[in-house]
Image: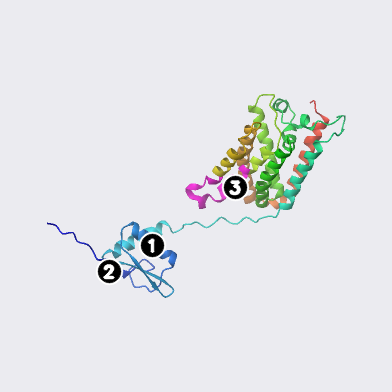
Amino acid sequence: MLEKKTIDIDRLEWVAVPRQLQDGLSNQPLSKKQLRNWTLVLQSRQIPCRSERVDHGWKLQVPTVQYQQALEELQSFEKENRNWPPPPPAELKQQENTASTIWVLIALGLFHILVQQRINLFGHNPVDWYALGNAHAGKILDGQWWRLITALTLHSGGVHLAGNIVVGGVFINRLCRDLGSGLGWSLVLLSGILGNLANAFVQNPDHRSIGASTAVFGAVGLLATINTLRYRKSLRRRWPMPVAAGLGLLALLGAGGENTDIGAHLFGFLFGMGLGLVSVFFIQTIKPSRLNNLLATSSTLLLTAAWGAALFFPGK
């Protein structure tokens, strides 16, 4: 009859694992983090181990008969994790642009109040801002380019405006802190323009839309690409997470509601992602501060020119 034998772990002869993981005596104690990691490695390999508190640290002990095996396992673990976690990406110099972002959003709100008024301008009695500025797909393709821009400044009501200001304010403010107001707002505006243009191509000619949400989702796409590129090493196999988060926001905020223009939101997001690559190029090769004032002025002039064209050439 076979007799089952058990090993009394307290009777085993124990030896301390040297901190340098090489044969030889070492009196250097382990840190608590190092002790925890090494203990988990040995336990996963079913190697008995025990810890002992010593001055200024810890000592990890294993049975003498399994000492070499323990050394090999720990050496392999340290080799595989030598450069993990990787160092965080270089910190971007954050630019305080909250005030400028708030002023742009205030201007958007004031313009919404203006378009509700009966104003006579340049032969329009009164000006029908929505008829002149909405993103009419057929008229855009016929050459009324300004509608790509003017539509971004129009909103159907206070709730529509407030939603874009709140959501857009959060993402655009973050974007402008990384890129500067001029570059940040220019890329947001450009993503909205390109999103409206692409939407005009896929919609029927009578399709009309208004709202800054195309540009807002452009800002979401911009941030998704920037964060994916900046943290791709830190995230390792999870590098698509910022893009996945952006797509989640698009599905949550941009795909519901009876009058939601899903196509414009989607195209704004996609062009924002593409322009995110451009923004990374600017950050790495050109100091955005040198261009911010020029880009901010150019964006303002473009908006002004678009509404000027809408008022002076409404039928062309």
Judged by depth in the image, the label closer to the viewer, 3 or 1, is 1
Relative placement, left or right, of 191 versus 294 is: left
Residue 44 percent coordinates (x, y):
34, 56
Label 3 sits on what residue type?
Answer: Ile
Q: Secondary structure at mark 3?
A: helix
Q: Which residue is label 1 attached to?
A: 38
Label 1 sits on what residue type?
Answer: Trp
**Mark 3 or mark 1: whose residue is earlier in sequence:** 1
**Mark 3 or mark 2: whose residue is earlier in sequence:** 2
In magenta segment, residue 236: yes
Q: Magenta: predominant secondary structure element?
A: helix
Mark 3–mark 1 Cα distance, whole angstroms, equals 36 Å
Residue 195 percent coordinates (x, y):
65, 35
Residue 226's tag is 3
Question: Few, some or many C-alpha atoms within 10 Å of disc 3 (few <14, some 14-19, many ≥20)?
Answer: many
Residue 10's tag is 2
Question: Few, some or many C-alpha atoms within 10 Å of disc 1 (few <14, some 14-19, many ≥20)?
Answer: many
Query: How many numbered marks have been drawn onto this rendered protein structure?
Result: 3
* Chain part drawn in magenta: 220-242
Relative placement, left or right, of 262 versus 36 is: right
Label 2 sits on what residue type?
Answer: Asp
Residue 206 percent coordinates (x, y):
70, 24
